Amino acid sequence: MPKRALLPLLQSMQQDIRLNYAVGDRYRPIRQIAQHFNVSQQTAQKAVHKLVDNKMLVARAKSGIRVAAIESNWQSVKPRVVLLSNSTDPRLNRAFLLGINEPLARVDFTASLVFCTHLDTLGLSFGEYLVDLKADAVAALYFPQSALPFFYAETKHLPVISATPVPSLPTLPCIHTNNTRHAHEAAVLAQQRKYRQVLLVSYFEDGPNHVRAREFRHQLARLQPGTSVTYTCLARPDSIVRLHQFFSSFDRDSVVFALDNAANYVVAPYFVSHQIDPTRGFLLFNSEDDEFSFPGLPPLAGVAPSLRSIGRKLGERLLTRLCSGEWPSPLVEAV
């Protein structure tokens, strides 16, 4: 049978072993494998031989096929690694995917992007959706309230790592941005440069109450009392008018602080059209790559790690988990 047709069967059998068997259990006989997975007995036999080579199964004449391990060593078949995203931002998804794949590529593994199509990401049905992805490992983007589904995935031996903290599930591995620390760093920069007019911009629904905006304002008020700090939500229809007004009176004491990577692309054209030096008046919280690039502007670095660099860290953790069977310490890291 062609290799490309055998691979889905191997992946399904590996998941079947992980979810339903323990080491030492008797596994399905060849005929039952063929019936259960709707393949020929010849194909089932080939798959068993592969998993015996992979040391997940042992096959003996009198005792039949038994489970030797529920974790694969990935020598016979590469793992299916999924980046599951709850974001519709293509730049963000691409940055995380590129970052994750950098360390995985060292051993010829590859992650693929899957957009979440499950509407209820809080309930147990989302946990079942995770398992039904038939993945060997999942990196999850922006599911901060999904403690129950992620716990369910843990019970099914599905490795999941998150790019967003899930406080009610401390056993969930996570690499995330330290919003408070980097917001304070941005406030220190604003104080050092003596900005007196600050415009915060983002697409965040909670706007000025988002931790990045809140901590920046609090820290700047402590460092430099009297500084004017206003906020504009770019999802609102009046945001364009507010930006025009701010840039029409832009001077050496003014700065725009973009709180999310998508906001960078809205703000950048104003610096180009008004011929304003962005190294003086443009603060970025983060960007997709280590530097933000836009036509007509010099490369700009954010105060926080790039999305791609966080993706790299997620990929490193996934690689360790896949190759050793254990998550590295600490389980949760703010960078």
Image (cartoon, rainbow, N blue to C red):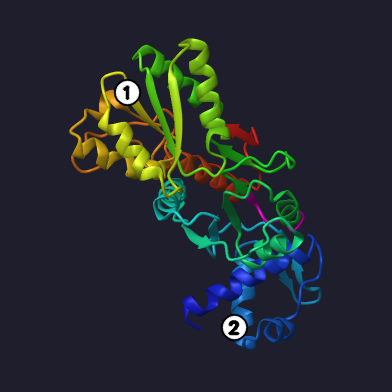
| Residue 184 x, y percent position in the rendering | 50, 21
Residue at 45% from the left image edge and 48% from the top image edge: 235
Three-letter amino acid code at the position of disc 1:
Ser
Q: Is residue 239 left or right of residue 274?
A: right
Q: Main secondary structure of the magenta part?
A: loop
> Front-most of 235 and 103?
235
Three-letter amino acid code at the position of disc 2:
Thr
Whichever of callouts 1 and 2 sits on the residue coming sooner in the sequence is 2
Mark 1 → mark 2, Cα distance in angstroms: 68 Å
Residue 323 in magenta? no
| Residue 57 x, y percent position in the rendering | 70, 66
Residue at mark 2:
43
Label at residue 126:
none
Residue at 41% from the left image edge and 27% from the top image edge: 303
Residue at mark 1:
254
User: Which residues, given as a range, are shown in magenta?
Assistant: 155-160
| Residue 154 x, y percent position in the rendering | 73, 52
Residue 10 sits in quarter = bottom right
Residue at 43% from the left image edge and 17% from the top image edge: 227
Q: SS of the residue at dot 1?
A: strand
